[in-house]
Image (tube, rainbow, N blue to C red):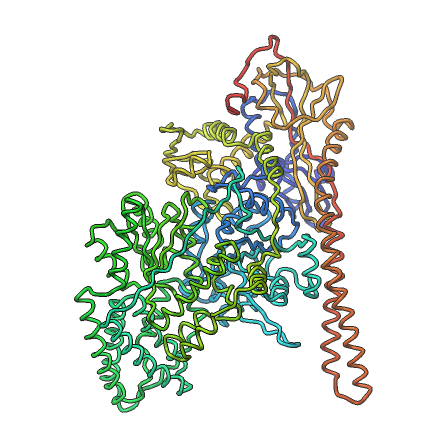
Amino acid sequence: MVEELKPGMIVACKRWKEPIEIKKISKVGKYLHIIGSTIYSSTHIDQLILLDEISTIQLQKIKSDFLSKPHRVFLAFEGKRYKHASMYDPLLALNISKVDPLPHQIEAVYGYILKLPRIRFLIADDPGAGKTIMAGLIIKELKLRNLIRRILIVVPGHLKDQWRRELKERFEENFVVVDRGFVDAHYGENVWMKENQIITSIDFAKRDDILPSLISAHFDLVIVDEAHKMSAYVYGDKTQKTGRYKLGEVLSRTSEHLLFLTATPHKGDPENFRLFLDLLEPGFFATTEMLQESIKNKDNPLFIRRMKEDLKDFNGEPLFLPRHIRTLKFNLSENEKHLYNEVSKYVREQYNKALFKEKKRNIAFALVILQRRLASSVYALLKSLERRKNRLEGLEKLSNDKIKAESRVFDFDEIEDLSEEERWKEEELWETLSVAENREELRKEIQTLNNLIEKAKEIVKEESEVKLNELKKTLKDLNKKYPNKKIIVFTESRDTLEYLEKRIRHWGYSVVTIHGGMKLDQRIEAEKIFKNEKQVLVATEAAGEGINLQFCNLMINYDIPWNPNRLEQRMGRIHRYGQQNEVFVFSLVAHDTREGEVLSKIFDKLEEIKNTLGSDKVFDVIGEVFFGKNLQQLLIEAAAGAKTREEILKEIDIKIDEAYINKVKENLGESLATRYIDYTRIKEMAEKVREYKLIPEYTEAFFKKAFMLAGGKLRKRRYGFLSIESIPYEIKSIAEEDRFRRKFGPSLKSYPKVTFDKDMAFKNPDSELVSFGHPLFEAVLEYIESTCGEDLKRGAVFIDPEGKLDGYIVFYEGEIKDGLNKTVGKKLFAIYVNQHEVKSISPTILWELAEGKAESEEMKIDIRDDRIIQEVINEMEAYKEQKLEERKREAKIKEKYGIKSLEYFIVKFDGELIDLYARKERGENVDLAIRNKEEQKRRYEKALEELRDQIEREQNLTMGMPRFVGIIRVKPAKVVMDYMKSDEEIER
């Protein structure tokens, strides 16, 4: 039996689910080594089989007798074609996701990123361009192409829920959040290896107790949002790397594909930007001059940046309508001013006392929270004072004579990136910190707090707060000018939110709230209530994170967050794609407070810069237009009186001249921008989708036939939706396999509202979009592959309604690989053969044929005929040339910058070594420095060798021998007639 088995034979055995084609076979001791692939699903097989088991292997001779049922052959061919759908449909992920495609998104994903053999790329578009959507498309597309399985998304802590929601709702992708709770629940395990699709926060991942476990994990794709936070700086000949940058270095080493997202890539510091790009491709740009050259030549292979004003829809209309920012300034009442001065005095005394005691520097910044609470509302201040007093009274009871100093260290950057609920918990701790060192100091502080509490209670009770009345007046004016229009009122304090909700409802408005104490599904429900039922939304920053409110265009900032990023996020919720009206933002600012005066000055300057620049994008990156100024720090210093009013105002009193505006443009990244978007090419891509018959109507027709073949039932619903009450056993058993679930996610027991059309799904969020990548659709594909695979080889009879075809159509699968053994492309080819000709035709031909009657007949052609194989090879060569051109373009850029940069470093090290050896000759002890420098040089020489090898291998494309898939017999209709419905109805 062993001697009978040869390469090319098809054999079956109980150990395999389907027959396999032997590629290579050899005897190894008491084993038989078989390498091959399953003939239906093309699964690779490489196994040792005991010689004793040889008797269980049976030769399979599948004869093409054309006795299979045509509908089974049709389903098998379509299933095979859909397996490689991403090769045919240039926009596949876009067409099966609940996203509204925009030209610049299509260009970035399909025109740039997916053409890269190894993705190392930065999307640096202006805010609101939909970077999350682009990232989702890349995830979906790479998964559909079987190029990735393990994915890590690293984001600021407060954006974790937003990412998880958008990927689930728009792309049907389920991600697990890895945080402290998840790690504690899986103690002793490497949590990064436990799940395949993970979201985590940048500041959690960089922690000393977390980073080591991340180093030992590998991911196929890593995405970093707000990636500019991973920064490094050059001071003289030294490079200072932040903890986040070191995390970036780990992610760069442990990932195959790496994607960065940010709207503020440059910061006006070319060296900082070069080091940032170094995380994507280490050493790709040796100097800032090389980087500037690539930007000037518009051939930088590592990033793309498009400006807001250049983004348009398919009709050429701007995506973003104008927005108008207004500062509503007011002065405090006499009672409020008195309270403000007393709170300021208290904060200043405690702040200076804390700074004086070096061990309590944290408390100095924590104390300023009281000033922020007062800037929010007197009610919020009152609640904070009461919490602080209760905490200090507790300390007084517990303490002896001395009070233990607070040893906890606060990282303010990390706290700003926490979710709102987590940040509130931290701030509640801040509220209760004290610099008191003994019981007497505690008593004095408690007495001060009692006095402040009484003053605050009086103002709240009388409802005399000026800002509250300004809000009432603003709401009344807006409601008069824009009757019943939706209005958002933002505050950063939960206490203020609860207070405003009661007051606004009392004024006669319908109100709903969103805050960080609500779970994501509760926030989404509140968003729906606001959209459909209520006029006013009172929200904290949680509504600026993951909630889409572009159906509203009126916004009031009841208080101003001191972190400019939060103000940008608030505005970004309504000033985004999909907004149908011009946006109006009103900010209430107490002009006669120190921090209020600073905020007023900042807004005045921003307005002046906007008018000079001719663009409102300064409001997207507020912190970036005040160079070298930390606005949050300035506001803290203003509130605490750490600097004089004159000193602080002088820092933000910038001279708006030509040099400054040029610097602003540089900081906004205008020099990095690609101004041209090729709309014609994008429209051509969309046309190909229809040509290859991958539009929803075709996938729906296929699914219905396949599902019913398995015994499934589909019930029609109104408006074109379908209902699936149960899943057939054979499909369900595939979907429940562990390897299937890990790849495609869990399937449901029933689907009450199914559609195959993404536009319908987009308009009906409660519906299920079933298409490529969806667990139900993929399980049906696998079912057809295993059930109807043999029918492909046997063949069936089809009728050409037009009476033109009389012969055979042979189907082959062709694959192209590069020198790294990575699949570059895979295609299904259809060759029409008769006695007179051999020609290539579209693999979608079956849609245009009718089912014929099964009639056994001798096949009059040889499927291995040289003419047939040559025709397939000709088609593959054209496909290969197309792919090679793309690879060559990439190679030229890598050689121009990557090779040149590494060579530059090697020459630089040579020069430094010559200098070190000269110093050694003079008697200096520089042996360690020489060893380190030689090691660095060897590392770069190795990197140069590897890059050259990689460039060569990526261009070394080879074709595999075409693989026979199946055959059909085509007979002409005796009378030209409509044998079956053509696809004209579907096309319509």
* Vertical arrangement, residue 670 with respect to residue 399, above or below: above
What residue is at 59 percent from the left and 74 percent from the top? 240
Residue 548 position, x and y percent, is 40, 49
Can residue 418 be seen? yes
Q: Quadrant of the N terminus?
A: top right
**Taking 758 as reference, is 532 left or right?**
left
Can residue 49 be seen? no
What residue is at 48 percent from the left and 73 percent from the top? 651
Instruction: Choose between 856 and 188: the one closer to the eye.
Output: 188
**Taking 361 as reference, is 481 left or right?**
left
How many numbered marks are there?
A: 0
Residue 234 position, x and y percent, is 62, 73
- Residue 904, by quadrant, is bottom right
* Vertical arrangement, residue 730 with respect to residue 371, above or below: above
What residue is at 62 percent from the left and 46 percent from the top? 676
Residue 584 position, x and y percent, is 38, 51
* Vertical arrangement, residue 702 with respect to residue 656, above or below: above
* Vertical arrangement, residue 36 with respect to residue 799, above or below: below
Residue 194 position, x and y percent, is 49, 58
Farthest residue, direction top: 975
Instruction: Choose between 354 and 918: the one closer to the eye.
Output: 354
What residue is at 31 percent from the left and 45 percent from the top? 482
Instruction: Choose between 399 and 822: the one closer to the eye.
Output: 399
**Taking 391 as reference, is 779 left or right?**
right
